[in-house]
Each structure stands twice: as structure tokens, then as C-alpha cells.
Amino acid sequence: MTTAAGEPRSLDARMCQRAVESRDARFDGVFFVGITTTHIYCRPICPARVSYPERRRFFDSACAAERAGYRPCLRCRPELAPGRAICDSVSQLARAAAMRIVAGALNGRRVAGLARELGVSERHLRRAMEREIGASPLDLAQTHRLLLAKQLIGETTLPVTQVAYASGFRSLRRFNTAFRQQYALSPSAVRRGRLTATSNDDSRDAMPGAGEGVRLSLAYRAPFAWGPLVALLAREAVAGIEVADGTRYTRTLRLDGCSGWIDIRDGARGRAEARPQLHVTLSLSLLPVLMPLRARLRQLFDLDAEPEVIDRHLGAGGLADAVRRVPGLRLPGAIDGFEAALRALCGRHLPGLATALGEPVASGDRRLLRLMPDASRIADAGPAHLRALGLPAHVSRGLVTVARELLAGRLVLDPSADAPATIRALRDIDGIGARRAHAIVARALHWPDAFPPAGRGRARTARVLDADRWRPWRAYAALHLALAAGAGRARSSRRLP
């Protein structure tokens, strides 16, 4: 939240000044700097000439800067800055509302509807957002819509009408009016002046065998252990739905009634001067759900993490060797909450279940044939059908119960949900123990402090190191321990005669 003087409460003004002077990339997206003479706000890494210190104001979000009357810089492009992971920094209500708004919850909907979903009055929600985030729900939604539109204008050749609707606007007229009022520029003027160096439209990077797609970038903070993350995704990839080959991750998906494919690779991999960002190509069929899709991709690849802070904390907690081996480790999230439950509950039975119940899809790629079964298909199938497909009886009952609870709205598996309450709700379901409940919450809610009870080997290690020292990033610690154990087993097998 920004104080009356414009300084973020969580950051010291002198630290912000030093970060701007040195263009320290660790603070990219953590705060923004507004220049009082031009009324333009920038990222701390902006390559433009550094202004005089007395002409700078600092804001902890793009929304706060725009609310104060500042326009985004056309050179450093604040819409490309990585975000911040929201855990305990704001109240649960404000956190839940903000995450839903970023995913498009107010696109074409009223604040009153969102408040009802969260179980509070509209007035209470507005008051909580103003107090905790420093912006109203509508201001936050408008900022994210405009920043997405600005990115689409700068990185794609989509017609302005498509840009408007993909950004969550419900009419071209409203989009043009909002864009001109906020940025004092027309969309066409921004497109004419875009920096070609920031585009990522190299056709050689398109998904093999796929049709036409839209290419965008998603920024992150270095370091990023891309190889281990893709290896984890490859190990659990379901044939016909996902392909992970060590350099990229490709899959089909359905979101809010739209189905298609996505292809992701690390834009900085093997390129010394490349920006830290993922390059995403998505089918045109997913353009209507671009806003929620971007939010889910950021969660899937843990792009809003601050790796240096996490690594330093875990290193001080006794994991220095593990962090040194894999700096910038990211937690794999989930493209869909129910899919996280499928993976945690089904295990080795998931490929057969997906083949039997996954809906066919046309992707243009012979490797991608179907969609992951969603909650409605599992609920319709019922426990008896799942048992006939080879799932154990307790898993079948638990999976169907999760699907039906989700469809009824009694269970929420997305990052806006309360983690401890969700763990308790999952453990109340027959067939879901503590380990599986924590595994589901870690991915579906993208909760960094999930720490499932472990087997004897990891339990002994945790007792020695005291897992409480890893809070609030125990999920990262658990993943480091699992990778270290896997590496140890691999070394032992190589020593065998």
C-alpha cells in the first residue's frame, strides 16, 4: 500500500532510490517510480536517463501509480514487469478479491457479484481493498485490463478490436475512451511507436505442427531453474495432452468454455543478453480467455516468486547446499484446480483415465489429441465407472466427491481460497489424507508454505533442520529435499556394479 507521501509502506525510500540508481533487477515489479515532471511511471530497471532524486515518487503497484495520475513508460513498459506473490502481506479477503480481479472477475461483471461470491457486502469489500491494496476493485480491474491491452498492442499484430475484447473490455468505444484517458495516447499511436526489440514474434519458435497462434511474453525474476521445472512437468506429463521435452512445455486445455493449446519456452535460455521472460504461444481460440489464462500461467510456472529472497531464507535454514545446486527453484502450479486434484489422487492411473474420459480436441499437432477430464466429466462418470477403469475404490470415491463439491461451490481450488481451510475440507473427504491434501493445495492454491507429512527419510531431515525455520516457504524446501533425494539415488545407482 502507498502512503500519503507516495512511498510504499513495505519499502524504504532510500532503498528505492539506490535500486533506481543501480537499475537493480531484483526490484523489478516490486515497486515503480513516478517522475513528477513528466507524470510517467517506470520500472526500476528503465534504461532511460535517471532523473533527479527529488523528482521521484515510489509506488508499490502500477495501479497505485496510475491512480495518482501517472502514465506508463513506453520504453521500459511496466506492463511487462513481473508481479508480486500475495501471501500474508494483505488480508485474506483483499488477497482473494485481488487474485480474482487480476484473472478477470470484473470483466463485464459488477463488484456486488464478486462480493457475494466472497461472502461479504460490496461496501465491506471496497473498504478492505482500499485499506489493504490502496485501490478500489474497479480501479484495479481497469489497470490490469489496460496494461494487458498495451502489451497486446506492443507484441502482436492483432486488430485493435480483438485487443479490446481479449483485454476484458466489452466494447471498442469504452476501450478507446479508457485508453486515451489513462495514457493520453491512442492505441494506434502506441503500436506505431512500439520497440521492435521487445517483440517475440519469431515464427521459428511456433509450436511444431500447430496452426496460427498469438505470441506473448511473461516476465520473471532471475534466477529461474527452468530445467528442473520442465523436468518435473515432463515426469508427470499425460500422453495426448502434454509434451515436455526439456526446453519447452506444450499442452491442450479448456478454460471457461474455450479450448485450445499453449506452448511455452524460456526466452532467456542459452541467450546471454535475453530478457528474463517466458515466450508463450497460444491458439487463437483461447484469446477470449486470455486474462484468466495469463494469471494461471503465472501460477503454473511460479513467475511472481522472488527467488533471491527465498533462496537466502532457505539457505540460512540449513538448505544452503541444496539452494546452491538449484538456484531459483520454482514451484510447479496448476493450470486448473481440479487438475491438481486429479494428479494428486490418481497418480499412475491418470493416463488411462485421461484416455477414457478426456474429450477429443483438434490442435493441429499429432501429439495433442484430447483435453484433461474436468470436474463435470468425472462427476458424471461416478465411482463405479472409475473403478472399472482401474482406480482403487477409495480414490474413486474421493475424486468424485471432490468433483461434485467443486461443481456445487462448496469447495474452491484456486489461489484465492484460504489454504488452511481448504486443507481441512479436503481431509474431510474419504480417500484424501494429509499428504494428498497438502499436495493439492500446494499446486491448486499455489501455496508456498504447504508442507505435507513425509516418509521417514525426509521426516528425519526435517526434524534435524526444524521445518518451521523454512516458513513461509516450506513448499520450496520440500521440493529441494525431494530433488536432493532423487539426485542421491541417481548417484548411488551409478556406483552399482
Image (cartoon, helix red, strand yellow):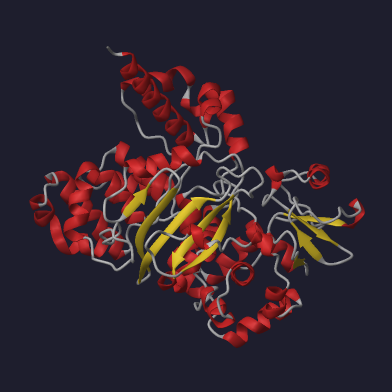
- In depth, the one of 112 and 381 nearer the eye is 381
Quadrant containing the N terminus in the rendered view: bottom right
Which residue is at the far top?
497
Compared to 3, does 464 lie above or below? above
Is residue 134 visible to the viewer in this orientation of the structure? no
In this rendering, would 384 be left or right of 27? left
* Count of number-bearing discs: 0
- In depth, the one of 216 and 200 nearer the eye is 200
Residue 138, image quadrant: bottom right
Compared to 158, does 65 lie above or below? above
Looking at the image, which residue is at 60% across and 67% down? 155
In this rendering, would 251 be left or right of 345? right
Quadrant containing the C terminus in the rendered view: top left
Compared to 250, does 313 lie above or below? above
Q: Position of residue 330 (x, y in %)?
A: 49, 41
Looking at the image, which residue is at 56% across and 45% down? 305
Q: Position of residue 46 (x, y in %)?
A: 76, 54
Looking at the image, which residue is at 56% across and 56% down? 218
Q: Position of residue 240 (x, y in %)?
A: 27, 55
Which residue is at the far bottom?
173
Which residue is at the far front?
204
Q: Position of residue 129 (x, y in %)?
A: 61, 62
Is residue 61 visible to the viewer in this orientation of the structure? yes
Looking at the image, which residue is at 73% across and 59% down? 76
- In depth, the one of 125 and 181 nearer the eye is 181
